[in-house]
Image: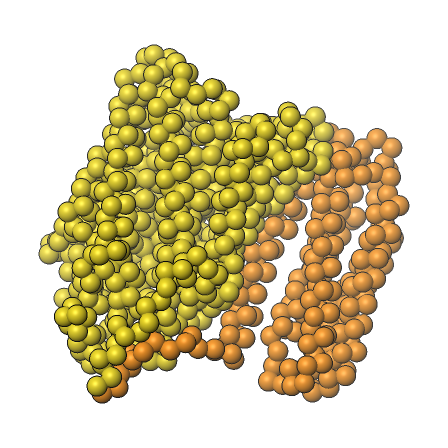
Amino acid sequence: MTTAYSAPSAPQEHGGEHDKHNLTGFIIFLCSESVIFLAFFSGYALLKTSALDWLPAGVEGLEWHMPLINSIVLVSSSGTIYLAERAKAKGSLWGFRGFWLLTMALGAYFLYGQAIEWSGLDFGFTSGTFGGTFYLLTGFHGLHVATGVGLMTLMLIKSFIPGNYEGGEQGVQATSLFWHFVDVIWIILFLLIYVWQRS
Amino acid sequence: MTLATFPADEPKPSWTRYFSFNTDAKVIGIQYIVLAFFFFLIGGLLAMIIRGELITPEADLVDRTVYNGIYTMHGTVMLFLFIFPVLNGLNNLLIPTMIGAPDMAFPRLNAVAFWLVAIFGVLLMASFFVPGGPAYSGWWSYPPVSIQNPLGHLFSGQGMWLTAVALSGLSSIMGAVNFVTTIIRMRAPGMGFFRMPVFCWTALAAQSLQLIGLPSLTGGAIMLLFDLVAGTTFYDPAGGGDPVLYQHFFWFYSHPAVYVIILPVFGIFSELFPVYSRKPLFGYVYVALASFIIVGLGLIVWVHHMFPSGVAQWMRNLFMFTTMLIAVPTGVKVFAWLGTLWRGKIRLTTPMLFCLGGLFNFVFAGITGVMLATVPIDLHVSNTYFVVGHFHYVIYGAAVMGIFAAIYHWFPKFIGRMPYEGLGKLHFLLTFIGANLNFLPMHPAGLMGMPRRVSSYDPEFAFWNVLASLGAFLLGVSIIPFLLNMISAWVRGPKAPHNPWNAIGLEWLLPSPPAEDNFGEHVPVVISRPYGYGLGKPLVENQEAIEQVLTAADLQEASR
Ligand code: HEM
Ligand SMILES: [Cu+2]
């Protein structure tokens, strides 16, 4: 008699199943990650509204022209990553790679713009809560942009593995989801830091 | 007959797997639990020192600054290295087997999460030996105390504490993502959410709280670390910062954290009461849903820890109201358990005794909790021993007792041997008496005004402190029969049949111990709700055939 309970076999590889878990797990993680930003944003708002002198001596406020250009770059990269996914869905691997690379370039440009902005500022991380929150928020967000570009590089390399993207690929979906997330966070950040100014 | 090969002719898996990077949830579960109890002993030793110091009004046993480090580390070890890991261990053992999954959704992530605990445990222990000693600002780590670094060393106890807590958070998030994904996606065929055991409901609720709450503490701790090492002033009023902001970050997580602890224990109660009173769980759906009402409310009560911290009066009132609301879903659960016990055929086994004791202590703690939620009372007793008494009733009296119940109940399943009842009952008796003797006197001491976190106190509190210390030493002794029981049962206890308690649930349709991939490809189809005690309805399709195979295997095993 053979039974359903005969010898335990080696753990099964549930390949296809696993892929779906990956996306679910990643979405759950993103929801959780957004709470860190929520914490930073609310801390920033609280410190800003209760501060007697928000701006450190000698600082006039934040220049917003370059960050605006940066914002436009980042927001449009959300569009290009969408186009990349569309191209992949249509089966055009080179179209996918093209738009994907363009998205990476836009992300890299954003980081470059951020670096330029940082180097030109006349206040530092320890210049009161103004300086502290500014670098904390932009730095933490920048870290996410860098992570996004890293993930995209990984996915781009994977696209050259023959057959890798046949039958759907959760990594691309997850990366693009992450990228939209980073983008939305930036919009909130831009409004909170550059649009809402006080002296 | 292939039956003969099942399961004993399997090469016995080597014990060394417990010391390796193993991805089997059942191995990881036991790793978690054993490591947690190792730290339980360390945390307990610290507690003995604390109570030894407090048995006399003078500060005579240890130096005052050492005392600060000791209670800080006691709290930190017990929460981050005992309670959370031991609960994650139970989650690892129970979630996959209860829902019929072969493993967790992300086995490797699971192993990483466990080893992170081991790493930050070592880090935290190492902080005892750095110049200046371990962190000394309490488990809250409130600024401004926690942003002082008087010796100026890079490796200060406080810095290591923060790093350890950050690693703990990382590990908990990995765990939470894993548990939630597993429960959502890997349930057995036929197991809709409303056929899921309550333990899985409470685990889902508790892990959702981790996911929502923990990032707030992480964010707050990152800012604290910058204040400590980089010279920012987020929490330093001298630079425009606000120490109360940290308290918000801290309690936005740490209040939900107490529900992360108690919800799985509610799950344990809900699993065990039906087994040992032979009745279906009273109001299953309401018990399950109440967990999520607790999640919702648990997220909007945190300011009750900050009533004396200079928050606005409207905030105090609002949070007093929400805190009291939580008593409603909690009460629903308590009445459901009482309804389950009512006219049941009660069997006073060790796990049942621990459950009953835990429930008793929990109700007591709920009453002091509502007292504390009342602003005018809290303003007087906050930061006194009354609070210490309250939360030890919950965490030791209810949660730790529930965890012991779970260990005695599921030990046969996952170890394959029976623990000894006599030692178990002795353990229960010592724990129940010890806990009440230890924590009850803290309430009058607190009401009289004895502050917490002091190593010397007014002699008028001496009587209650002597009692408490005696209770603590009794608790220290109570761990001996437990360890004896566990070790001897593991080594040479009687072989456990697949279902020694006559319980209903998927995990009891597996051999003891289960195979590495649990049901493998042959996951039974669930056809009814859990807890069908006395109803005579099968839980799964072909239940009889499955039982027959398992019983035959039990007999064969017993005759070896
Ligand atoms: C009916 C339910 C409960 C209510 C109304 C309640 C209320 C409170 C209040 C108002 C405080 C703050 C006292 C103060 O600091 O002045 C408090 C402290 C505390 N409670 Fe509860 N509580 C309840 C259940 C629980 C549970 C289930 C747990 C744990 C599993 C718990 C653990 C704690 C801890 C650890 C503290 C003190 C933390 C500290 O100050 O170090 N409570 N509780
Ligand atoms: Cu609380």
The residue at the point 35 percent across, 29 percent down is B48
The residue depicted at 48 percent of the width and 49 percent of the height is: B118
Q: Is residue A40 left or right of residue B84?
A: right
Q: Is residue B110 above or below residue A163?
A: above
Q: How many marks?
A: 0
In percent of the image, x 24 and y 84: which residue is there?
B2
Q: Nearer the viewer, residue B554 or B446?
A: B554
Rendered image coloring scheme: by chain
Q: Quadrant of residue A52?
A: top right
B311, above or below A75, in the image: above
Q: Residue at x 52, y 62 (%)?
A: B109
Quadrant housing residue B440: top left
Which one is nearer the viewer's eye here, B248 or B29?
B29
Is residue A15 positioned above or below B109 on the image?
A: below
Residue A121 location, x and y as percent? 86, 43
Q: In the picture, which chain is yellow?
A: B
Q: Which chain is orange?
A: A
x and y percent of residue A159 in the render? 70, 79
Quadrant including the C terminus of chain B: bottom left
In the image, residue B267 lies at what x, y percent?
Answer: 32, 55
Residue B80 in sight from this viewpoint: yes
Which percent across, then down, holds residue B236? 66, 29
**Residue B201 position by quadrant:** bottom left
Q: Judge whether A73 appears above or below B37 on screen.
A: below
Direction top: furthest residue: B459
Task: Give left or right: position of B544 versus B399.
Answer: left
Indicate left or right for B433 with A45 as reference. Answer: left
Residue B293 can be seen in this image: no
Quadrant where the N terminus of chain B is found in the figure: bottom left
